[in-house]
Amino acid sequence: MSPKFVPFELERWQSTWENRVRFNLSESGVHPLSIQELLGLAGASALPLLDVRLGYAQSNGTDLLRERIAALYPGASPDQILVTTGSSEANFLVCWRLIEPGDKVAVMMPNYMQTAGLTQNFGAEVRPFQLHEKEGWEPYAEEIRTAIAPGTKLVVVTNPHNPTGHVLSDASRKTILGRAAEVGAWILADEVYQGAERDGKTTASFWGSGYNKLIVVNGLSKAYGLPKHGRATTTPRSGRPARPIISPRSRSIPTSATN
């Protein structure tokens, strides 16, 4: 018997109402600008846009784009970058590629709830570990270890956190990385709010931690206030050349896997 479908209630609610209200207080991005307004702020000419050909783009991101994204992640190469249309698509592709019925997934709570629903709809069992307000939104180490049980396929973290804005302590990061290594789980680190910190201190990426089963999702819509766009990076294992773990689309994720 198929499990009951888990709807993405937040996005369903937003999609129903966001275009029918005068003031949208639920949006986490910035108010959109017209191309004319954007070029005006940049002091740039619109003439180069008139030479842009309207056709299919390189589906995994152009070589130049992937080179520039890779430069944001020390040790990453363009072959490890996957570009998608927004971070939600990147998260979907990662879950679609990795999760099979019966898998276990550990998810940081509270969160945006996309991956929690997706992994259940792909047949996984979700095990939450909580961020605690009384602890300044830090998780308890023992709850992390319990949620990331033996046999766990994927661990989902958001750092900086959505919706609290909390940045994990070094101790919590080490606990998550260490426990994932113990059980052989992948880590999906959603870092979309990196660079949007209110204190001006950019959060360190999970990329570069040395763990080789890591996928990092990031984009441009939050910190940069630009249209939906994402990215992904993978690190090679066993001396094989690094490749995107899933077929290309349009956002980027640093990840540490190969096909």
Image (cartoon, rainbow, N blue to C red):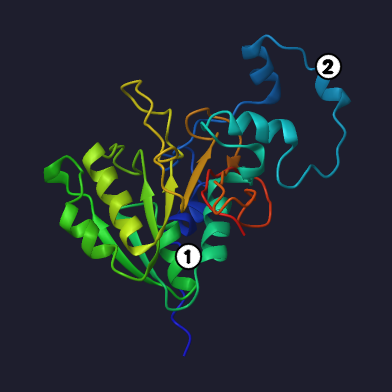
Taking the spot 27% from the left edge, 45% from the top edge, the residue there is 174
Name the foreground residue: 113 vs 173.
173
Q: Is residue 162 above or below residue 104?
A: above
For the residue pair 81 and 45, the one nearer the viewer reads as 81
Residues at marks 2 and 1 touching, judged by CB atoms closer than 8 Å: no
Residue assigned mark 2: 47
Callout 2 amino acid: Leu
Q: Is residue 52 above or below residue 14?
A: above
Residue at mark 1: 118
Occupied quadrant, residue 159: top left
Query: x%, y% of residue 245?
Result: 60, 56
Residue mark closest to the camera, 2 vs 1 = 1
Observer able to see residue 7: no
As drawn, is 65 to the left or to the right of 200? right
N-terminal-most mark, 2 or 1: 2
Q: Position of residue 194 (x, y in %)?
A: 42, 33
- Furthest residue to the top? 43
Numbered disc 1: secondary structure: helix
Residue at image point 58% right, 58% down: 93
Compared across the picture, whether 96 is left or right of 1 comes to right
Whether residue 150 sits left or right of residue 94 in the image: it is left
Q: Quadrant of the C terminus?
A: bottom right
Query: Which residue sits furthest front?
Result: 239
Q: Amino acid at mark 1?
A: Leu
Dot 2: what SS?
helix
Q: Residues within 10 Å of mark 1 (few under 14, many from 20)?
A: many
Q: Position of residue 144 (x, y in %)?
A: 23, 57
Report the number of discs. Answer: 2
Query: Which mark is on residue 254?
Result: none
Q: Position of residue 224 (x, y in %)?
A: 52, 27
